[in-house]
Amino acid sequence: MNTLARIGLWFGSMLLSVAAFSVAFSMVFNAGGALILVFRFTMIFVFPVWCLYLPVVLFFKDAEQQRGRVILLSATLVGPVSVLLWSIGTSFQLLSSLRRSWVNAQRCISL
């Protein structure tokens, strides 16, 4: 497999995983009309992480048999997992912010 084919596989697996994540997210959260928005938002966060993974794709010149499957599986999971971790972190920040706002509101009411 030459370098250009590996880069094409890298890019194709990125698009496939982002599309699968976007469809699954839209189905789970019943956001069918926002599929393109979810896809764009996911691409914003997936592409930089995916570019960090490109040297690994270029390093394995003979990605055959078991190693090829491992590379493809890990490349397919890197983007959605990073977006999931980012969204969990953001959720914790949001909950912390809401809690602080609630405490401040309670203090203002009690005065």
Image (cartoon, helix red, strand yellow):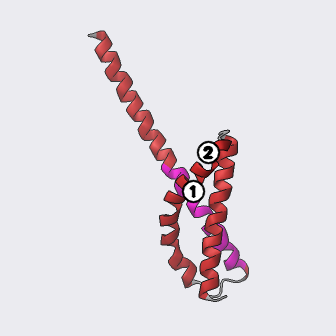
Amino acid residing under circle 2: Ala
Per the image, label 1 sits on a secondary structure element best described as helix
Is residue 78 a member of the stretch shown in magenta? yes
Q: Position of residue 109 (x, y in %)?
A: 32, 12
Residue 54 lies, with reference to residue 16, above or below; the image says: below
Quarter holding the C terminus is top left
Amino acid residing under circle 1: Val
Quarter holding the N terminus is bottom right
**Which residue corresponds to the image point at 30% horizontal and 17% vertical from the top-left?**
107
For disc 2, the marked residue is 34
Decide whether the magenta segment is chiefly helix, strand or loop. helix
Q: Which sits in the foreground, 44 or 76?
A: 44
Residue 54 lies, with reference to residue 76, above or below; the image says: below
Q: Which sits in the foreground, 77 or 16?
A: 16
For disc 1, the marked residue is 81
Residue stretch rendered in magenta on the structure: 66-86
Residue 92 placement: quadrant? top left
Looking at this view, name the residue that lies furthest to the right: 65
Q: Few, some or many C-alpha atoms within 10 Å of disc 2 (few <14, some 14-19, many ≥20)?
A: some
Left or right of 35 on screen, residue 48? left
Q: Few, some or many C-alpha atoms within 10 Å of disc 1 (few <14, some 14-19, many ≥20)?
A: few
Q: Position of residue 11 (x, y in %)?
A: 60, 72
Q: Earlier in the sequence, mark 2 or mark 1?
A: 2
Per the image, label 2 sits on a secondary structure element best described as helix
